């Protein structure tokens, strides 16, 4: 099976003070032949407390980690980031809280996410080897490095909430299932892109093994064979639950997981901090990228040069 792509190019952010963000895409569940966001899919609303709260009820500053080698300086503001990608739908709800101000919502924060597709490929780096045995990213074996699937921004509302429509990520060696995230403040939405500001937080969102493995047994994920890295064995996840980026996941239909999931989390940040994700918390690099990564040419308008090969995405 071949993944589908829309013909879009990345618009480079003009004035980002700290290293920029990446945008993501979403897909259709081919196993059951329904649109990823059909009328039977319900949408949950993220609450402003709980997911990243300590046992005492106080919000917790999220742990920053490496941005990884598959970041692109794009700035597309959009809710649906799938660009026709096939996969199990994921309705992602993120709440941004200010840990320095009684956990108040951070209105206007720009949340940026990016992740791999069902076979472990990232847009912009489709020649990178995801490990195991995966289908070619395009039918004729050529690359599609001008694509922007599974990358995007959303601007937090008055409750600090953003929502994305995407797909469950696949996996690649040597990483567990994950989504990258950056939180920006101080910039502005302009012509469908986010311009300026600074990066306050760089992190990753994670999935429990039971959910991930159940998804990977479905099409199109099952076409990627090989060894999946369990959550506790991942080189980036620190084992601290929601404070470390572990999502709360609820199936849309418990009897038909191909219908998709709602994922929620609260990100506690310091709006005055700056964090570009270089080396992650404590300078930890996050490991080595997969074999052959990244060798693709970034989309038009993306920064020149190759990402640093010192941190795994």
Image (tube, rainbow, N blue to C red):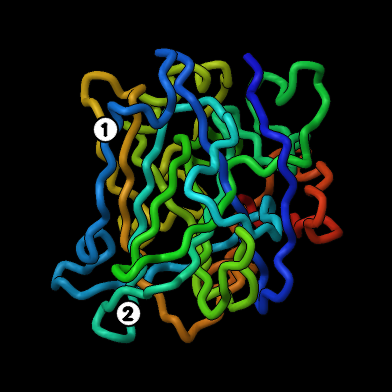
In this rendering, is residue 246 above or below 55? above
Binning the other alpha carbons within 10 Å of mark 1 as few (below 14), some (14 to 19) or many (20 upward) gives some
Q: Is residue 205 left or right of residue 143?
A: left
Judge by depth and name the residue closer to the eye, 90 or 192. Answer: 192
Quadrant of the image for the N terminus? top right
Question: Which one is in front, 242 or 11?
Answer: 11
Where does residue 36 sit, x and y in percent of width and height?
43, 28
- Numbered tag placed on residue 99 in the rendering: 2
Q: Residue at x 36, y 24 (%)?
A: 214
State the residue in front, 44 or 136: 44
User: What residue is shown at x 43% (from left), y 24% (from top)?
Assistant: 35
Q: Position of residue 158 (x, y in %)?
A: 32, 70
User: Residue at label 1?
Assistant: 251
On the image, the x and y values in percent for residue 68 come to 63, 55
Q: Is residue 144 left or right of residue 64?
A: right
Res 38 quadrant in image: top left
Determine the CA span between mark 1 and mark 2: 30 Å
Helix, strand or loop at mark 2: loop
The residue lying furthest to the front in this view is 191
Disc with the residue nearer the chain's start (1 vs 2): 2
Could you classify mark 2 by the number of other residues whose Cα lies within 10 Å: few (under 14), some (14-19), or many (20 or more)? many
Element at label 1: strand
In terms of image quadrants, where is residue 12?
bottom right
- Left-right relation of 293 to 217: right
Reply above or below: 30 against 236: above
Residue found at x 28% / y 42% = 43
For this view, does 33 lie left or right of residue 184? Answer: left
Q: What residue is shown at x 38% (from left), y 47% (from top)?
A: 92
Residue 91 location (% of width, % of height): 37, 42
């Amino acid at each position: 099976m071949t993944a589908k792509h829309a013909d879009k190019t990345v618009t480079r952010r003009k004035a980002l003070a700290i290293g920029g963000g990446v945008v993501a895409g979403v897909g259709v569940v081919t196993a059951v032949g329904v649109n990823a966001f059909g009328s039977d899919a319900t949408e949950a609303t993220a609450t402003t407390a709980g997911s990243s709260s300590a046992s005492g009820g106080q919000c917790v500053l999220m742990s920053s980690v490496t941005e990884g080698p598959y970041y692109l300086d794009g700035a597309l503001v959009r809710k649906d980031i799938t660009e026709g990608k096939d996969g199990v739908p994921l309705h992602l709800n993120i709440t941004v809280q200010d840990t320095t101000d009684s956990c108040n919502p951070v209105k206007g924060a720009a949340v940026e996410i990016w992740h791999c597709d069902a076979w472990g490929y990232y847009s912009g780096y489709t020649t990178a080897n995801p490990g195991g045995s995966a289908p070619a990213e395009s039918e004729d074996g050529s690359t599609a490095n001008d694509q922007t699937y599974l990358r995007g921004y959303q601007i937090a509302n008055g409750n600090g909430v953003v929502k994305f429509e995407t797909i469950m990520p696949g996996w690649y060696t040597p990483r567990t299932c994950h989504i990258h995230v950056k939180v920006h403040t101080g910039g502005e939405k302009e012509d469908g892109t986010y311009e300026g500001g600074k990066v306050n937080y760089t992190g990753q969102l994670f999935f429990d093994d039971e959910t991930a493995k159940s998804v990977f047994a479905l099409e199109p994920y099952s076409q990627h064979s090989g060894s999946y890295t369990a959550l506790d064995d991942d080189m980036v996840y620190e084992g601290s639950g929601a404070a470390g980026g572990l999502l709360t996941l609820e199936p849309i239909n418990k009897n038909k997981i191909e219908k998709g999931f709602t994922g929620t989390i609260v990100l506690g940040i310091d709006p005055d901090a700056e964090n570009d994700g270089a080396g992650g918390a404590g300078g930890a690099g996050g490991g080595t990228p997969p074999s052959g990564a990244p060798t693709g040419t970034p989309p038009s308008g993306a920064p020149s040069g190759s990402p640093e090969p010192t941190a795994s995405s």
